[in-house]
Image: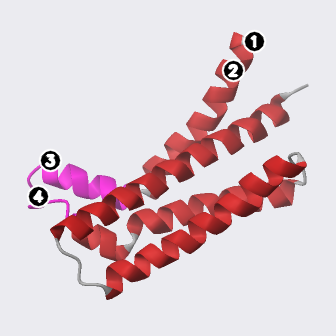
Amino acid sequence: MVIASMRWLRAGSTWVLWTVLAGLLPLWIRVIGVYLHVFPDIGWIQILKDGMLLYFSIAIVVAITTDYHLLGEHYSKYAHIYMMELFPAILWIGSVIIYFLIWTSPLDAVGYKSALHIEIAITISSCIYALVHKAIQITRSERP
């Protein structure tokens, strides 16, 4: 049982780790640049306006749902509704709304901080979603 749960965690977390490292490479370059004193700051306001975290989150969820539908192995009825229809729709609609609110509304420092926290929460939720789905998918394919 422990070995199966470790395999499950390894499968999902490996996929998410490599996706976060590659998908957020521009952010990591900025962070390293600030650390090395190449850039004066990370530029969170510009990251918010660019929608880097939102685009990344949407890309993860679209990749997951596309894989799911192309592979043809489906979840039970309710898991399918929640994981493959409801969550992606809420994430996509919420991300688009937040993106346009940031671009069209003049936000003060508190507004930008709130928007950043929401974008980080969306990104973390997308990564957890990917971890669970990929863990299920990979461990299913590894079964003899």
Q: Quadrant of residue 15?
A: top right
The residue depicted at 62 percent of the width and 47 percent of the height is 130
Most foreground residue, 142 or 121:
121
The crowd level at tag 1 (other Cα within 10 Å; few <14, some 14-19, many 20+) is: few
What type is the residue that disc 1 sits on? Met
**Which one is in front in this view, the residue at disc 2 or the one at disc 3?**
2
Who comes first in sequence, dot 1 or dot 3? 1
Q: Quadrant of residue 51?
A: bottom left
Determine the secondary structure under disc 2: helix
What type is the residue that disc 2 sits on? Ser
Residue 137 image point, x, y percent: 77, 41
The reply to whether discs 4 and 2 touch (Cβ–Cβ < 8 Å) is no
Determine the secondary structure under disc 1: loop
The reply to whether discs 4 and 1 touch (Cβ–Cβ < 8 Å) is no
Determine the secondary structure under disc 3: helix
Classified by dominant secondary structure, the portion drawn in magenta counts as: helix
Most foreground residue, 4 or 128:
128
What type is the residue that disc 4 sits on? Val
Q: State which region is magenta.
A: 25-44
Q: Which residue is mark 2?
A: 5
User: Disc 2 and disc 1: Cα gap in Å?
Assistant: 6 Å
Residue 74 image point, x, y percent: 88, 50
Q: Which residue is mark 3?
A: 35
Q: Which residue is mark 4?
A: 38
The reply to whether discs 1 and 3 touch (Cβ–Cβ < 8 Å) is no
User: Disc 2 and disc 3: Cα gap in Å?
Assistant: 37 Å
User: Disc 1 and disc 3: Cα gap in Å?
Assistant: 43 Å
Determine the secondary structure under disc 4: loop
Q: Which residue is mark 1?
A: 1
